[in-house]
Structure formats: structure tokens, C-alpha cells
Amino acid sequence: MVNRDGTLIAEVAQVTVDPSAGSVMVNQFWAAQDNGLTINPKAVQGQIESNIIQATSRTLKEQVQFDQSSVTSLDWRGVSDPDLP
């Protein structure tokens, strides 16, 4: 659960792990958010969906590599539509 600027967010993923293939598949994703007064519900829905995509991408695909002075991995691949539940 994250509490940032008064907004409470919780996310849970159901995954299937295939150790022989080294793959993880997200089957379902649940998210709950208490953001207080909502002026634009569609914007909040978009924010929640974007959080799901970003969390899935960061967990399963993204990687940052460094050398002694800078970031060296500028070509990471995030998730695409087939990777999402």
C-alpha cells in the first residue's frame, strides 16, 4: 500500500510462473484507490490503469544498468499490450 499526498493505493496481481521457460504471466490485476474528492472520475480511472501498466512494466521488464559514471541501459523494453492482463 502506498500513501502519497493523501491518496491511498493498493494493488495486487495474480500471476502464473513458468520456471522452465523463465516467464511470468500476469493473469489478473486488482487495484483500489482512495483519492478523496473526485472531480473527474475518468481521469482517476486513467490514473489507476496507468499505475497498473507502470507497476507491471517495472516489475517484469524494466532494468537499469550503471557504470561508474552514468546509466548505460537506455534501450530497455517496457510491457506491451500482449503482456497486460
Image: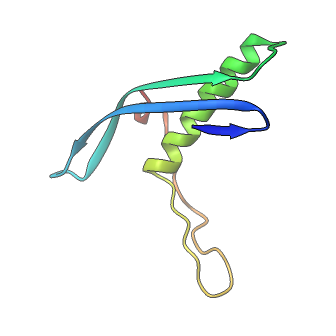
Q: What colour scheme does the image use?
A: rainbow
Where 9 falls versus 38 (above or below)? below
Which quadrant of the view contains residue 7?
top right
Q: Look at 18% across and 51% down and name the residue there.
A: 19
Q: Position of residue 75 (x, y in %)?
A: 57, 62
**Residue that appears at 84% across and 12% down:** 39
Q: Is residue 22 left or right of residue 47?
A: left
Q: Which residue appears farthest toward the left when viewing the image?
A: 20
**Residue 20 visible here:** yes
Please state if 45 lies on the left or on the right of 54 as rendered: right
Q: Whole-percent x and y of residue 45?
A: 66, 18
Q: Pick out the residue farthest to the right.
A: 39
Quadrant assignment for the C terminus: top left
Task: Please give left or right for residue 31 compared with residue 68 in the image.
Answer: left
Number of numbered discs on residues:
0
Q: Position of residue 72 (x, y in %)?
A: 60, 75
Does 85 sit above or below residue 63?
above
Q: Residue furthest bottom?
A: 68
In the image, residue 41 sits, relative to residue 71, either above or below, namely above
| Position of residue 25 in the picture relative to residue 64 (left or right) | left
Taking depth in this image into account, of 38 and 59 the one nearest to the observer is 38
Quadrant of the drawing holding the N terminus:
top right
Frontmost residue, 18 versus 41: 41
- Residue 78 in view here: no
The residue that appears at 68% across and 85% down in the rendered structure is 69
Residue 58 placed where, x, y %?
Answer: 53, 49
What's the residue at 59%, 83% (across, down)?
67
